[in-house]
Image: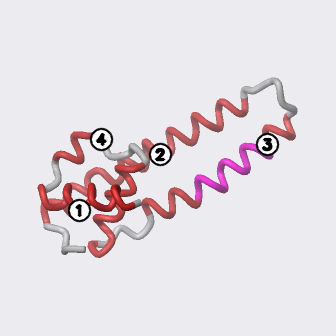
Amino acid sequence: MHEIKETDWKVLRHVHPLAVERFCERVLSEVTAVSHDRTQSYHERYRQIFKIIQNRDHEIARIFDNPRRSLALIMLAQMRREGLLTEEGFSSLSTESRGAIEMMLGTW
């Protein structure tokens, strides 16, 4: 991995909170759908919501925790893979960083 450019680091610092919000919105939509599913008992819905939260908690930690320069490209690639990095955010990155991210996504 190459060192992330300062301009790309600034892009990450800008898109990070936006991507977290998108992730949380997605999770809350999933929880809302389960909570309104009247075909299941309250207990079944509770258990399913608990499982969703546990799984998504691991995902949010994997994708967003510990934003450091040494992990920046990996973090951006994970955001991209999950559909949390918009095309605008992705295109704001340098050609080198976009290439590195696309290479990572091709090997995952």
Q: Residues within 10 Å of mark 4 (few under 14, many from 20)?
A: some
Please name the residue that numbered disc 1 is placed on: 100
Q: In the structure shown, which secondary structural element does the residue marked by tag 2 occupy?
A: helix
User: Do residues under tags 1 and 3 come within 8 Å of each other at their CB atoms?
Assistant: no
Separation of marks 3 and 2 at Cα, in angstroms: 21 Å
Kindly give the residue lying farthest to the top in the view shown.
Answer: 38
State which quadrant residue 3 falls in. Answer: bottom left
Q: Is residue 89 left or right of residue 82?
A: left
User: Do residues under tags 3 and 2 come within 8 Å of each other at their CB atoms?
Assistant: no
Looking at the rendering, the stretch of residues picked out in magenta corresponds to 47-57
Please name the residue that numbered disc 3 is placed on: 46
Looking at the rendering, in which quadrant would you find the N terminus?
bottom left
Q: In the structure shown, which secondary structural element does the residue marked by tag 3 occupy?
A: helix
Q: Who comes first in sequence, dot 3 or dot 2? A: 2
Looking at the image, residue 60 lies above or below residue 35:
below
- Foreground: 23 or 108? 108
Residue 2: percent from left, percent from top: 20, 74
Separation of marks 1 and 3 at Cα, in angstroms: 41 Å
Nearer to us of marks 4 and 2 is 4
Q: In the structure shown, which secondary structural element does the residue marked by tag 4 occupy?
A: loop
Q: Who comes first in sequence, dot 4 or dot 2? A: 2
Give the amino acid type for the residue marked by disc 2 in the picture: Phe
Please name the residue that numbered disc 4 is placed on: 86
User: Do residues under tags 4 and 2 come within 8 Å of each other at their CB atoms?
Assistant: no
Q: In the structure shown, which secondary structural element does the residue marked by tag 1 occupy?
A: helix
Kindly give the residue lying farthest to the front in the view shown.
Answer: 107
Q: Who comes first in sequence, dot 1 or dot 3? A: 3
Q: How crowded is mark 2: few (under 14 residues within 10 Å), some or many (20 or more)?
A: many
